[in-house]
Structures are given as structure tokens and as C-alpha cells.
Image (cartoon, grey):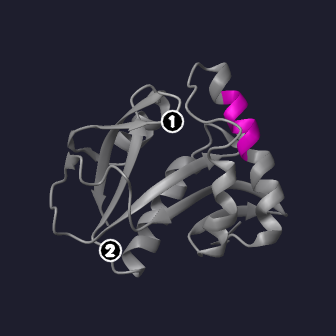
């Protein structure tokens, strides 16, 4: 297996993989991603060198993005508001590889990258109804921050999100 930054040649396969993830989430009543998010962000993620993939034999197994800001970052009480943090976003595992430990492996990889880049904390936001993701983060020693962030969309749709963090 190879872990690396995504390149533009990966874009089509990433969009296909995440489209299947969205369908699977919808089938499990976790209706938080759609035709636009997250796929429409991938091109910029790749251009900005912030999307990482795990690949084997030309098949993407998992991917995530690391961002240095997040819309909800000031809405919760982090353990250390001064500590340098990076945000894990858009973590997805190819549905063919669900429940095989790749989510945890990618969290480990994200922590390693964050550490190499000089960050003290890996943080993220997760929607309150995404119980499988919350369980994954807790299992990987993420601590829930006090408070929450409501992401409100133009059509009035609201995602209630919790912040989690772990020292890298």
C-alpha cells in the first residue's frame, strides 16, 4: 500500500469512491453528504496539496484532507486554544474496505502528517448523527471539546457538529 498526496489523475476515482460512500451513508440514515459535498471540493484540495490517499494496485482505499482552518474552530472550547492545530476533514473509506481498520489507519497517518508539519493537535468536526464516525474518533483517543457548531446552509438545512481533538 502507498500513502501519498492525491494528484489530479486521482480526481475521477475519488469522486466515484465518495459517491458510493454517500449512497451507503444515505442507506444508513446518515444524510449529511450529497452530490456537491464533499466531491466538489476535491479539485481544490488536490491543488492545495492537502488531500491524502491510501492506494493499492491503482485502487484508492481511503482519503482525507488536512486544513489549517475550520468554520467552527472558534465555536467550541478546545483543550488548548493557543496550541497549533490542523483539521481532519472529508475522511472517507472505500465501501469495499469498510470495517477493516482503514479509518483508524488513516487517522494514524493524519497524526503523523500533522506532527511532521509542526502541529500540536489534530482536530475535526463531526455531525451529531454520524455515530460510526464518532465511535471511530473516540476509539482513536479523540476528546470531545465543550460546545458545538451549527453549520447553517442557504436553504435552511442545519448540521449540528461536535468538535474533537487529539494531541499529535
Q: Marks 1 and 2, how far apart in space?
A: 33 Å
**Sequence-wise, which precedes: disc 1 or disc 2?**
2
Position of the C terminus, as image quadrant, is bottom left
Above or below 131: residue 37 = below
Q: Residue at x 65, y 38 (%)?
A: 98
Q: 10 Å neighbourhood of mark 2: few (<14), some, or many (≥20)?
A: some
Position of the N terminus, as image quadrant, is bottom right
Of residues 100 and 59, which is closer to you in this image?
59
Residue 21 position within the rendered picture, expressed as x and y whole percent measured from the top left: 69, 37
Mark 1 vs 2: CB contact within 8 A: no
Q: Residue at x 49, y 64 (%)?
A: 66
Position of residue 32 in the picture relative to residue 2 (left or right): left
Q: 10 Å neighbourhood of mark 1: few (<14), some, or many (≥20)?
A: few
Toward the front, the furthest residue is 154
Q: Would residue 64 be seen by someone viewing this image from the given angle?
A: yes
Region of the chain picked out in magenta, as a range? 18-24
Disc ID at residue 119: 2
Q: Which residue, given by chain and number where applicable, does mark 1 sit on? A: 154
Residue 39 position within the rendered picture, expressed as x and y whole percent measured from the top left: 69, 50
Q: Residue at x 66, y 63 (%)?
A: 53
Of residues 156 and 4, which is closer to you in this image?
156
Q: Residue at x 22, y 44 (%)?
A: 145
Position of residue 97 in the picture relative to residue 99 (left or right): right
SS category of the residue bearing label 2:
loop
What is the total number of numbered labels drawn onto the structure image? Answer: 2
SS category of the residue bearing label 1:
loop
Residue 20 within the segment the image draws in magenta? yes
Residue 40 within the segment the image draws in magenta? no
Amino acid at each position: 500500500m502507498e500513502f501519498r498526496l492525491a494528484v489530479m489523475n486521482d480526481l475521477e476515482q475519488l469522486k466515484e469512491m465518495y459517491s458510493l460512500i454517500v449512497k451507503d451513508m444515505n442507506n444508513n440514515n446518515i444524510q449529511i453528504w450529497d452530490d456537491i459535498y464533499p466531491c466538489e471540493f476535491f479539485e481544490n484540495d488536490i491543488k492545495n496539496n492537502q488531500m491524502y490517499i491510501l492506494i493499492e494496485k491503482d485502487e484508492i482505499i481511503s482519503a482525507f484532507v488536512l486544513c489549517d482552518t475550520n468554520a467552527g474552530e472558534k465555536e467550541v472550547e478546545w483543550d488548548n486554544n493557543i496550541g497549533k492545530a490542523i483539521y481532519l476533514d472529508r475522511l472517507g473509506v472505500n465501501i469495499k474496505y469498510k470495517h477493516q481498520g482503514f479509518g483508524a489507519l488513516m487517522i494514524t497517518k493524519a497524526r503523523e502528517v500533522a506532527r511532521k508539519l509542526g502541529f500540536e493537535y489534530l482536530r475535526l468536526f463531526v455531525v451529531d448523527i454520524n455515530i460510526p464516525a464518532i465511535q471511530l474518533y473516540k476509539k482513536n483517543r479523540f476528546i470531545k471539546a465543550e460546545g458545538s457548531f451549527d453549520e447553517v446552509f442557504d436553504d435552511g438545512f442545519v448540521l449540528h457538529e461536535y468538535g474533537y481533538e487529539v494531541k499529535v
